[in-house]
Image (tube, grey):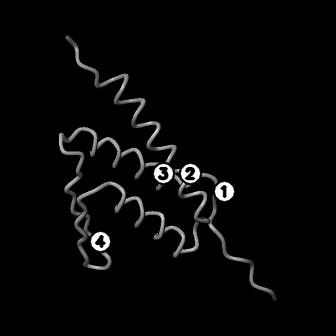
Amino acid sequence: MDAAPRHAPYPDWPSGLCGLIGAATTALSQLNADGRVDLNLTSVAAGVTRHYDIAADIQHDAIDARVFSGIHFRTADAVAIAMGTQVANWALDHHFAPTN
């Protein structure tokens, strides 16, 4: 009996995690006056904590993680980061504008 091929149970386009990472890192960096994120992320499974100062570093690691784990191709991740960034920019422009 042949084993069924292993693949993710969802389409490759776009990467949901990278969309979230794009939106979150864009919002965090734009809400801070200096444009930095100053964020620690801890993997409970690996017991590793990573520190990030800028959004691009988190985005890069998220893309690599999805590609290296075989879940997505790099294009789906990079496009999702861009989509998330656009969503965050729209939300910041329309919902976090000064009220006076």
Residue to which mark 3 is pinned: 81
Residue to which mark 2 is pinned: 79
Q: CA distance from mark 2 to mark 1?
A: 14 Å
Q: CA distance from mark 4 to mark 2?
A: 25 Å
Residue type highlighted by circle 2:
Val
Q: Are marks 3 and 2 in contact (CB under 8 Å)?
A: yes
Circle nearer the N terminus (4, 2): 4
The residue under the point 40% across, 58% down is 59
Where is residue 66 shown, x and y percent of the image? 51, 67
Where is residue 68 shown, x and y percent of the image? 52, 75
**Up-down: is 82 above or below 5?**
above
Residue to which mark 4 is pinned: 43
The residue under the point 32% across, 41% down is 27
Q: CA distance from mark 3 to mark 1?
A: 16 Å
- On the rendered image, what quadrant is the N terminus found in? bottom right
Q: CA distance from mark 3 to mark 2?
A: 5 Å
Residue type highlighted by circle 1:
Pro
The residue under the point 36% across, 57% down is 56
Q: Is residue 48 left or right of residue 71?
A: left
Q: CA distance from mark 4 to mark 1?
A: 26 Å
Q: Within 10 Å of the Cα at label 3, are there few (<14), some (14-19), or many (20+) other Cα atoms? A: many
**Up-down: is 15 above or below 2?**
above
Residue to which mark 1 is pinned: 11
